[in-house]
Every structure is written in structure tokens, then in C-alpha cells.
Amino acid sequence: MEFEMSAEERRQLLEAYRNLRVTDVCDGMDWTMHFDLGLVDSAIRPLWRTRVCGIAKTVRYVPTRTRIPTMTPEEYDAYSSNWYATICTYPFGDLIEPGDLLVFDCGGLDVGLLGSNNTLAYKNKGAVAMVTDGGVRDTDEVILEKVPVWSRHISRTMVQGRLEFADMMKPITCGGVPVHPGDMVVADGDGVIVVPRKIAMDVAKWARREHDNDNQARRSLYEQAGLPEDETLD
């Protein structure tokens, strides 16, 4: 697990992408000749409409081959606890820094790896959002808690007998897109886009130009329509 990023680089990246939309970043990719790069599968959607940007921390889970044997509910209590403790662990929680965006490779499986408890815990640690090509459950509560989550599935199941932790802070695939630790991720109601770290600042320059030009035009239209300004004009 080799990943280093200085506090100053983190600050610069997060500031460069502050308030940018997915469409702005997509345009920035075009202007730097990276057409369609980083566009996550549009089937991965937000639970609720919001806009975030963050620095990718990556996690991978894989389907298990272990079948759960028949047992009593009391025996299953211990079995389930052991699954979380030794098989489907969540060791990345201690790595979270403010401004991180957790990206999960779950192989597209409809399994509730994320839920109302752990997503709020990660938000409390400083994660700005979670993006998964797997599933999230307890979604009514996740929405009420205002935890930003983009997922492929609205799931109902737990992970026992379904998922195993594989690794973290390595290159993964999410929604058909390679994601490396340290990449910039922008997500909103239009979907998710991933910008490779090595081109992130150049892309941000042109994305910001598109953002500012669009806001200037929209501000004039707001005035014509008699609409009060809102946070999207920032």
C-alpha cells in the first residue's frame, strides 16, 4: 500500500475542484484532449441530489466462495460476528482524512456493503462521499443523515456469505473506470467522473473556465427571470 500526498497537494487539489460540476470536469477533460476519460457508468447514481469533490481512497471486495452452513440463530450470532471480524472487514476506516472520497470496487454485486451506520461513521471521520459499483442499504436513513452516496444498487442483504475484503489503496475499477488512490473524483446529479492525479490540475484549469463562463451567463438569466441567486452561482 504505497501512497503519499502532501497536505499542500491535497489542499490545492480540493480547492481547484471546489464547486465544479461533473459537466465542467467532463469539458475540462475534452479541452485537454482526454475525451470520455473517467466517465463512470451512468447506472451508478446518487441516493439524493448533491455535489461533491474528493480525493480517492480505493477499496476492493470480491464474491466469496464460502457457503454458510445450517445452524441455529444463536450459532449464527457468533458466525456473523466472525465474518465481519475476519472475512469482510472494513480496515480502511482508520485511513480516512478530511476531503477523502471512498471508492469501492464490489464487482457490481447487489450486496449491502454500505448502510446507514458505516456511511455516517465515514462521514464523521471526514469522508466527503462514497461511490460504489455495489450496493447500499438502509437508504431512507442514509438520505435523512445526508450522507452522499453514489451506488449501482439499492440493496437489502448483509455481507455474510456474499462478500470478502480483498485489498485497499490499490488501483481498482469502478463503473468501468480505473481509479487509483489520489485521483480526483467529482460527483453530482449527473453522475461521477474520475480525473487521474497526474492531469488533475491541468483539467481543473479548463473546467474552472467552463464553470465560470456558464455561471456568468446564468447569472444574467437569473436576473431576467427574477430569480434570487443560489449556491450554484458560486
Image (tube, grey):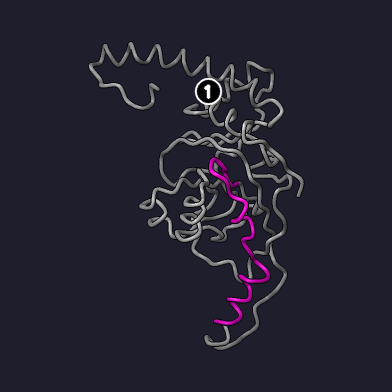
Indicate the position of residue 114 as horizontal and vertical percent values. 53, 57
Mark 1: which secondary structure? Answer: helix
Disc 1 crowd, CA 10 A, few/some/many (<14, 14-19, 20+): many
Q: Closest to the observer: 11 or 226?
A: 11
Say which residue appears at 36% left-offset and 27% top-offset. Answer: 231
Q: Is residue 232 above or below residue 214?
A: below
Q: Closest to the observer: 149 or 4?
A: 4
State which quadrant residue 196 falls in. top right
Say which residue appears at 58% left-offset and 76% top-offset. Answer: 81
State which quadrant residue 17 falls in. top right
Q: How many marks?
A: 1
Say which residue appears at 58% left-offset and 53% top-offset. Answer: 134
Indicate the position of residue 2 as horizontal and vertical percent values. 76, 46
Q: Closest to the observer: 129 or 224?
A: 129
| Extent of the magenta region | 77-102
Q: Amino acid at mark 1?
A: Asp
Question: What residue occupies the far front of the structure in this picture?
Answer: 7
Indicate the position of residue 24 as horizontal and vertical percent values. 53, 23
Looking at the magenta stretch, what is its main secondary structure? Answer: helix
Residue that label 1 marks:
24
Question: What residue occupies the far right of the structure in this picture?
Answer: 2
